[in-house]
Image: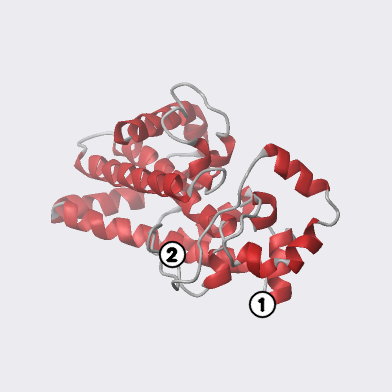
Amino acid sequence: MIGKYHTSITNEALGESFNGYAINYIDKGNIDSDELRDEITGVTDGYNLSAQHFNKASLEECKKFLDSAQEVVIDDFIEAAKANSNEDEYYEQAFYDFGRLIHNIQDFYSHTNWINYNKDEIWNEDIENPNLEENQTLKTGDYSYFSQFLDQINPFYKYYLSKNYDKLYEGKSSISHYGMNKDEPGTIADELYEEKYGTSGFSAAADCAREHSEKKWEEIDTILRQELSGREYRKMKQEIADFDMTQVDFEENLDTLRENFNSDIKELD
């Protein structure tokens, strides 16, 4: 999705669980996923860059990134809860990393054909056995710079997609990322979805992304409640509520946040 939509979805999904300072860190981590498109030694060489977007990578690679990022986030919060000093610095990393995780989740809905099958139930995060009917094929758009260029300049591409909608969006045939993405209102996929189903494809994807982002924190929070002692969990919740690192802090520490995330992902590879 486009950055401003990631931001609005994140704020709407998590605004009741975190204060403004924490939301800013989560949002900046989310948006930073789109900034890191080229490999940088020590910063992005720990994982398949495209896997963080459900784009230009297999569904299996994308799911592997999701699982690893979630493990990193849980470890972050446990470490923060057990820390004896400088708690904000630990939560700074945890919030940034959580943003990287939910970027992946949010892109799932705009970069796959999930909403063509199910716009009322979020994905169960299983690639081999997604909560879909047996005849439904989950897929992401194929990506290459060459196909992207050709599809964007082809004036007949939308007509081709429309005439072959069932095969390309809801069948097993491959489709380009340009034809699949619902990153913002007005994409080809958004418009064709609305023509067929009477509602915006972008809006349907955004609604699922919002619900899944909210549920993801609830899931992580439940895990943390189980992993921590009662005292540690209460301490963590209070420290999350009191978090007050600013935008200036984020900008000063961004390189370290990126490097730490990359290092942790590497360890899980």
Judge from the rendering whether residue 29 lies leftward or rightward of residue 197; answer left or right: left
- Asked if residue 244 can be seen in this view, the reply is no
Residue 118: horizontal and vertical position, in percent? Answer: 51, 72
Q: Residue 210: image x %, image y %?
A: 50, 63
Residue underneath mark 2: 123
CB-based contact (under 8 Å), mark 2 and mark 1: no
Q: Upstream in the sequence, badge 2 or badge 1?
A: 2
- Tell me residue 262's x, y (percent): 40, 31
Q: Which residue is mark 1?
A: 197
Left of 168 or right of it: where is 263? left
Above or below: residue 151 compared with residue 11: above
Looking at the image, residue 126 lies above or below residue 23: below
Give the answer, above or below, for where 134 lies relative to 92: below
Residue 127 lies, with reference to residue 152, above or below; the image says below
* Residue type pointed to by label 1: Tyr
Residue at the spot 26% in from the left edge and 41% down from the top edge: 80
Task: Please tell me which residue is depicted at 50% across the width and 69% down the height of the picture.
Answer: 136
User: Left or right: where does residue 82 sit relative to residue 74?
Assistant: left
